[in-house]
Amino acid sequence: MIEDKNQQRTDLNNLGEFGLIKHLTKNFEIHHESTVKGIGDDAAVLGFKDEHVVVSTDLLVEGVHFDLSYMPLKHLGYKAVIVNLSDVFAMNAEATQITVSIAVSNRFPLEALEELYAGIETAAKIYDIDVVGGDTTSSTTGLLISVTALGVVSKTETVYRSGAKPNDLLVVSGDLGGAYMGLQVLEREKQVYKVNPNNQPDLDAYTYIIERQLKPEARKDVIKLLKDLEVKPTSMIDISDGLSSEVLHLCENSEVGCDLYENKIPLDPQVISTCEEFNIDSTTIALNGGEDYELLFTVDQKDYPKIKANPSLTVVGFIKEESAGRHLVTRAETKIELKAQGWKNFNA
Amino acid sequence: MIEDKNQQRTDLNNLGEFGLIKHLTKNFEIHHESTVKGIGDDAAVLGFKDEHVVVSTDLLVEGVHFDLSYMPLKHLGYKAVIVNLSDVFAMNAEATQITVSIAVSNRFPLEALEELYAGIETAAKIYDIDVVGGDTTSSTTGLLISVTALGVVSKTETVYRSGAKPNDLLVVSGDLGGAYMGLQVLEREKQVYKVNPNNQPDLDAYTYIIERQLKPEARKDVIKLLKDLEVKPTSMIDISDGLSSEVLHLCENSEVGCDLYENKIPLDPQVISTCEEFNIDSTTIALNGGEDYELLFTVDQKDYPKIKANPSLTVVGFIKEESAGRHLVTRAETKIELKAQGWKNFNA
């Protein structure tokens, strides 16, 4: 929360566009054989052999998707990459390259952009992806980041949203609701900070959920795990908008119904305790919270033995015929129709 | 200049993000065999066989790259696509797919976005490209468009900025400076309109240059022409920032020098007359104006017979050893060192 007002400031006007791109991307190294030419020509050149290329793109807008009063720029850079990689992994693909474009107002000094790119670089290193292009321009107001991610997957291994079939198991990785509750804690601290800027917040009890919000991870490990277990999901999607919205996407694309069991939804103890503190229902948060970047997928029942013992994976329901509808089975064993609340940025 | 204030307005809040994307992209059709899956999954899936994939991305920001007081939204959508295709063609590639992301404030009604997407759709049809993905989100202020274009080129036909060698010819397509002078005319009319909104401007004398600014084209035809003529350029770049800046990019990437002849720079008569009217030197405009989206390339001298008679192509200079430097040879036959002025958006 505490900003150092004395940090060095280099005005972006001193660099010009080419100087800025060169400066910000000078540490980026190329690791993938498929990256024939990265930054520095009209377009990047990639060679993928006879496999499927997957492409995903996302925009993050200041004041809509992030608030710089509690989102450090390095984390923001990291998260902007993660959000896109998550989509690539949701195709069962290996993420290989990204392009990063930013629009930024003159109120940001060069050092701020260096922080942002340090986060991008860290994500690129950890997830082993090449940064192959982008665009840097000024904006009249805030900061905006546009990332496009590319990945590669053999034709027979590509997993769509549309392959789920009746009797398949519905599975999620990790746990849900953490990112949303982390945001609630950060928003509360921001209000406290506004009233008393000298107040030092004690956030120890919220470490996990704040990290889920500020430094999410994409489940590259789950894609590898499924490969190691020799499980090919019948359908898959990443959980960016809340579980209920994503379950409905899978069902709609696969033209099936489902039963989702409330008591199976994986929740971290910190999510439960923070929900109690905020007096919010934790199931509502898991269903509608968003930004967890876990994977939701369906597997054939025959694969159940392969996944059942795994601590990263939880079976949360079953796929049914479309005519059966899409329901949440509550702890009280009543059935409620699933509805997408999700994050509606246009209504926010 | 005249805005119809009574047009129908549908509030974006009534749709939500998924509804909006579905609505705006419902007319987009898939034509390319390489588009395995377009919009509607976590990522687009593309199959390119064993060829090079090229990727290029650009951000267009309201108030920086365009002014909606004279840029109709349909033209803006068209131009946002063209800008990216131009980069793909500059790799000697065939443009095949784009993703389009927009951030937009609530001051825009749905009908405005429909106009924007109508322009995108028109460009996609004319240039035969599939729209395979994107992101739609709200912004706190203006409109921002991020386009990523993909293309494909056989490995032996890929042309970089780096292949020019001494004695190669320096060639440009079309003519230069039109887009910049079109912008000058539009800016002047905007000032007139501010003083007297009832004044109906007579822009007949500026039709060509205004079209160059508002509805530029990317030189897909030149790429085809070169193929038909069996000419593979040794290096190539698109002219987005003005001729001098692009010549220097080619020379730097190829580690060569050059002589660029002022009297060879192709100018449309309307550019010349408008420069006279505005009392600006037309060479300065061609060198530094930007946004022409012509192609600049180098060819081996042996290919001269194949290109010399072509009205779309003009030889404007020669590549030299790097030690010879990079010069403009003026009409008075003096040599001036080439300098990049270009469009420096951070200084604008």
Image: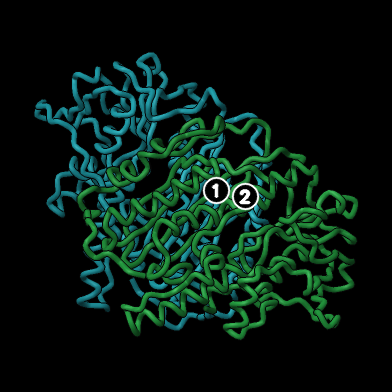
Chain colours: A green, B cyan
Of residue B66 and residue A311, the one placed in the foreground of this image is: A311
Badge 1 element: strand
State the quadrant of the N terminus of chain A.
Answer: bottom left
Task: Decide: few, some or many residues near mark 2? Use Cα within 10 Å; few <14, some 14-19, many ≥20.
Answer: many
Residue contact between numbered discs 2 and 1, judged by CB atoms under 8 Å: yes
Tell which residue pokes out farthest to the top in this image.
B302
Spatial CA span between label 2 and label 1: 7 Å
Q: Amino acid at mark 1?
A: Ala
When asked about the image quadrant of residue B332, the answer is: top left
- Residue A88's disc number: 2
Residue at 90% across, 51% down:
A302
Say which of A153 and B242 sits in front. Answer: A153
Q: Position of residue A94 (x, y in %)?
A: 63, 42
Residue B215 x, y percent position in the rendering = 40, 54
A304 displayed left or right of A223: right
At horizontal 82% and vertical 76% (from top left) the residue drawn is: A329
Q: Residue at x 37, y 75 (%)?
A: A200
In this view, B25 is above or below A180: above
**Residue B347 showing in the rendered view:** no
Residue A55's place in the image compared with A320, above or below, is: above
Give above or below for A155 relative to A60: above
Subunit of mark 2? A
Regarding mark 2 in the picture, which secondary structure is present there? Answer: helix
Tell me the kind of residue under disc 2.
Val
Q: Residue at x 20, y 49 (%)?
A: B273
Q: Which residue is mark 1?
A: A149
Depth order, front residue of B203/B140? B140
The percent position of residue A289, horizontal first and vertical second, equals 61, 73
Residue nearest the observer in this picture, A348 or A119: A119
Picture quadrant where residue A333 is located: bottom right
The answer to whether one can see residue A256 in this image is yes
